[in-house]
């Protein structure tokens, strides 16, 4: 008789973390590292390393270049970042998204994976988190 798959130790998809830290303390770096590790544990991803760039506003930061090399050689599932902000400014982030996409990896964000307009922000966040607006009870949320 076969045992259930859930009873076997199975490695999750391989991911790498990326942090771009500008004037950051060692404590903040440690906290962000823990955040990435917790996210990966929650989503059954195997975090194999974290690449960290400090300062610079260059699209050619050394840790990001190393990340691209590892992604290309390993065929990893994706890259985990705390927020999209860690990709850099608008133009650099766009270029980096294209580079990660070109090697076939996915971008995974711990927070802030979408943009909303001011008028729809409250509804979008509530829909994603299941939050109850102030002044409404749990039963009011369930009724149409």
Image (spheres, helix red, strand yellow):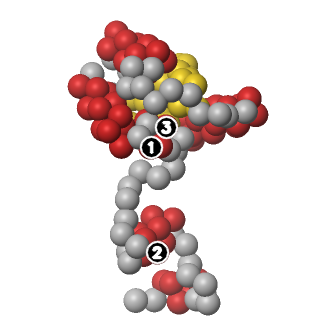
Q: Identify the residue at the far top of this view.
A: 73
Q: Which residue is mark 3?
A: 86
Q: Which residue is mark 2?
A: 122
| Mark toward the viewer: 2 or 3 | 3
In the rendered image, residue 111, in percent from the top left (x then y), is placed at 51, 50
Task: Measure the C-alpha gap from mark 2 to mark 3.
Answer: 24 Å
Residue at image coords 45%, 20%: 61
> Could you tell me which secondary element the residue under label 1 belongs to?
helix
Residue at image coords 37%, 65%: 116
Q: Contact (CB < 8 A) between labels 3 and 1?
A: yes
> Could you tell me which secondary element the residue under label 3 belongs to?
helix
Which badge, 2 or 1, comes first in the chain's sequence?
A: 1
Quadrant of the rendering where the C terminus is positioned = bottom left
Image height of 37 relative to 90, above or below: above
Task: Measure the C-alpha gap from mark 3 to mark 1.
Answer: 5 Å
Residue 84, numbered label: 1
Q: Contact (CB < 8 A) between labels 2 and 1?
A: no
Residue at image coords 54%, 23%: 53
Which badge, 2 or 3, comes first in the chain's sequence?
A: 3
Image height of 129 relative to 60, above or below: below
Quadrant of the rendering where the N terminus is positioned = top left
In the rendered image, residue 3, in percent from the top left (x then y), is placed at 49, 28
């Amino acid at each position: 008789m076969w045992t259930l798959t859930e009873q076997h130790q199975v490695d999750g998809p391989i991911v790498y973390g990326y942090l771009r830290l500008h004037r950051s303390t060692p404590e903040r770096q440690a906290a962000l590292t823990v955040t990435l590790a917790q996210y990966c544990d929650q989503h059954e991803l195997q975090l194999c390393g974290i690449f960290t760039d400090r300062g610079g506003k260059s699209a050619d930061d050394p840790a990001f270049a190393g990340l691209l090399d590892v992604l290309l050689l390993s065929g990893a599932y994706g890259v985990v970042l705390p927020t999209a902000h860690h990709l850099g400014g608008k133009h650099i982030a766009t270029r980096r998204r294209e580079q990660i996409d070109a090697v076939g990896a996915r971008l995974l964000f711990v927070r802030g994976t979408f943009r909303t307009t001011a008028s729809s922000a409250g509804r979008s966040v509530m829909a994603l988190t299941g939050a109850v607006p102030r002044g409404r009870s749990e039963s009011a949320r369930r009724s149409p």
